[in-house]
Image: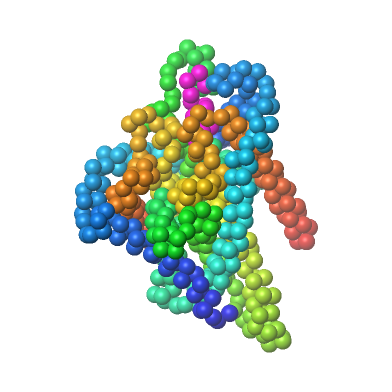
Amino acid sequence: MKSRKLSIPYIVWMLVFTMIPLVMIMITAFTDSSGGFSLEPFKAAFGYTNIFLKSLWIALASTGICLLLGYPLAYIITRLRPSTQRTVIMLMMIPMWMNFLLRIYAWVLLLQHNGPLDLALSLLGIHGSYSNNTAAVIVGMVYEYLPFMLLPIYTVMGKIDPGLIEAAQDLGSNGFQVFRRVIFPLSIPGIISGITMVFVPSASTFVVAQYLGGTDDIMIGDVIDKIFLTNNHIGAAISLILMIFIFVFLVLMNLFGDEEAIA
Amino acid sequence: MKSKKKKGVLSKIYIALILIFMYAPIAVLIFYSFNKSRSAVWGGFTLDWYVQLFHDRSITSALMNTLSIAFLASIFATILGTAAAIGISNFKGKKRVLIQNASNIPIISPDIVMGVSLMLLFTFLGVIFGFEMGYVTVLLSHICFCVPFVVLNVMPRIKRMDQSIYDAALDLGCNQWQAFYKVVIHELMPGIVSGALMSFTYSLDDFVITHFTQGAKFQNLSTVIYGMLRKKIPPTINALSTLLFLVIIIIMVLINIRDRREEKRKAQKA
């Protein structure tokens, strides 16, 4: 039980399958096809700045909408009876167990021309095209990741001591004040992990934009996927930039979370 | 009093709207799985797509691949991760923080970067040792992203465990192996089980990492679906989704029934 040796296989495993691959990405990003040191891959990577920015924009929008929808939902759920709480949470989780690609494909069907949404809205006299645009991509992302926002916030809110809320009420706070002074500050750690859990996968996702987006809705993940078919070095450079960006984001979120915890 | 009731109704409407948002796409998939016509328009009821689904070799073999990879990956990851968690808990200070952070890298780095980096590793090793990517490289990659979840689930259990019960078992005549197996593993079991379950579900659902490490011949369910979506989409996919959804619902209901029973038993004991 006192043995550290048990962790040796995993430490070796991490070296081979986590560290070395990361080093290989770095090496590939800083060399050209002749194998010598080169900054060309990064120069080429900066040609994709617009796509990179668009991916970030889509990811930010999806994260924001997930927060706007998920936060009130978590709050409402915590006020229900415990057995009802469990049922609603389970109902929110079930679609997550469906295959990722099938969930996206479902939206393709739902939004398609002459599809269910189109038919329903045309009964009301509204005609339009709902697929193949940025909004459809964001809807798809929100659908994929909403439970990732809901669960951490719900968990944190569920742990808030009801005594604190009663105390605030006894001291004369109205419903809104209780929310602003007690519930909201205490739920910030949940918000932060929710934002992280939605933003990281949605910034780096691929496939979603391919099916739901228009011709100019290309995300950085799709670029990485395509480019590795032709040029490893540029692909590695873009991957490296994406990874560094996400690490910076995580560090910032952590700093913000710590500060909130102190204040 | 009146405003409270109003609030309750509004809350219920809000939950209902969100649930409609979550289930409408699935309802659409199920609806189209019975549609005779291949287009968006309803062309009459049929079960043909279900029949075709079971005759589609690429789907059935991909399903078997997905299940066997998920099964093996979660077993290997659980063993490796449990041992690692116990080992890591015996390190102290900076070393421990370092190892734990390294272990979390696959969780926090984007899937696509991990997939790409493993692909680079396997193509490099493949050139040296003369192998091609396939079943084994996918299995190794899945173990990679599963182990951290096992470590994360087992670690808190170790922290909560009373170290002296292991010593007590030794004093009472267990040898080291018995004490380890009967006491330590027994205590960690809930963490081990949830780590294994998480591994299994993540492996089942994985697309990105498999996509990059599968090579030319291997396919799992996700990558088969991906391939189909790129061409003209066959309605068999709708039938497949409906069946998967049915299986998920059955599993979830069974889990729920089991949980309720356990709660009742606990309540009776108390």
Tell me if residue B67 can be seen.
yes
Residue drawn 49% across and 50% down? B214
Query: Residue A98's quadrant in the figure?
Result: top right
User: Measured from the top left, where is residue B194 in percent x and y?
Assistant: 60, 59
Residue B75 drawn above or below residue A77: below
Check if residue A106 falls in the magenta segment: yes
Q: Nearer the viewer, residue A17 or B153?
A: A17
Image-based side of A137 in relation to A156, left or right: left
Q: Quadrant of residue B102?
A: bottom left
Q: How many marks?
A: 0
- Rendering coords of residue B41 (x, y %): 56, 18
Judged left or right of residue B153, residue B184 is right
Q: In which quadrant is the N terminus of chain A drawn?
A: bottom right
Is residue B194 covered in magenta? no
Q: How is the image coloured?
A: rainbow
Camera-side residue of B226 and B41:
B226
Q: Quadrant of the C terminus of chain A?
A: bottom left
Q: Nearer the viewer, residue B234 or A95?
A: B234
Q: Is residue B103 left or right of residue B25?
A: left
**Which residues lie in the magenta part?**
A103-115
Where's residue B237, x and y in %? 58, 33
In x, y percent, where is residue B211?
47, 47
